[in-house]
Image (spheres, helix red, strand yellow):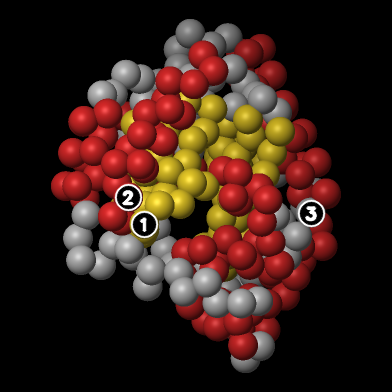
Amino acid sequence: MTDSGVQKWNKYLILCELGLSSILLLEKSIHRFAVTEYRAAAAQARRLLKGGGVKRLVVIKMVNPMLPGQLHNIRLQGTVSLLAIEDRIRTATNPHITEIWVCASQVSRDMSCFSGRLRIDLELGEEYLEIIWWASPRLLESRGSRTRSLPYLALQRQPGRIQFSYESIEFPLRFSVAEKEEYCEYALEKIGALRVEHRTGIERLLAECEFLNIQSVSIEFKFERGVGQFIDWDTAYDRVIIERFLHGD
């Protein structure tokens, strides 16, 4: 794998190396701009917010090329003026920022739009699955009052078990029991199919973690209108994995 010079982009390239994503999909979903092109980035964010009559969440990522982990995000929904977007980008810019990335996700309020993360504990053999509807996986890091209106599901699978066990089910009060079951069953079926489709790539990532004595890895995903993709991965030692893919050691 060739070093892109941007650690976060290298993480995405590893997804491609593993067959969990593709360059075409990356370039389609992430619009990259130099930091000096902040006005063009703001215009792209505005177009994505307005386009197609589809409810979208637009995320502007301020890219420090040395950071493989979460980048500073500007999150936009609804009606936001171009000048307001430009102002937020300027405010978030600092000397370490070299690029601005603009991404969008559909957050239509139906069961086919959801995201989440699968965390695999390689030492204990346990799996933890979190799903949140109508939002990005980033909100899982800060669940609270801002996410109470969003359906949420957490599950755990013990070593040797086939089925996940439910840990937490949090849905708005308006949902009936039958609706909750429908949402949960739909999401689990879709995630299961995505895992089967990409089993080889997931196993390769886990094998690399085991080789490097990394005990836990999270893989993030999102589904839009029922179509799923893996969008990121995280460990406590991202740089070590990146170096292994770049240099083989």
Which mark is first along the chain, 3 or 2? 2
**Left or right of 188, for residue 68:** left
Asked if 161 appears above or below 102 in the picture, the reply is below
Q: What element carries label 1?
A: strand
Give the image location of residue 112, x and y in percent: 65, 24
Q: What number is the disc on residue 34?
A: 1
Give the image location of residue 222, x and y in percent: 60, 40
Q: Is mark 3 on a helix, strand or loop?
A: loop
Q: Quadrant of the N terminus?
A: bottom right
Classify 10 Å Cα crowding around label 2: few (below 14), some (14-19), many (20 and above). few
The residue shown at (43%, 20%) is 50
Which amino acid does the dot numbered 1 rest on? Answer: Ala
Q: Is mark 2 on a helix, strand or loop?
A: helix
Asked if 8 appears above or below 132 in the picture, the reply is below
The residue shown at (32%, 63%) is 98
Q: In front: mark 3 or mark 1?
A: 1
Residue, disc 2: 37
In the image shown, does 80 or 33 lie closer to the viewer? 33
Furthest residue in direction bottom, as rendered: 249
The residue shown at (54%, 18%) is 52
Give the image location of residue 53, x and y in percent: 51, 14
Marks 2/3: CA–CA distance: 36 Å
Pointers 2 and 1 in contact (C-beta within 8 Å): yes
Give the image location of residue 221, x and y in percent: 61, 45
Q: Residue 122: in sight, yes or no?
A: yes
**Left or right of 79, for residue 13:** right
Q: What number is the disc on residue 198?
A: 3
Classify 10 Å Cα crowding around label 1: few (below 14), some (14-19), many (20 and above). some
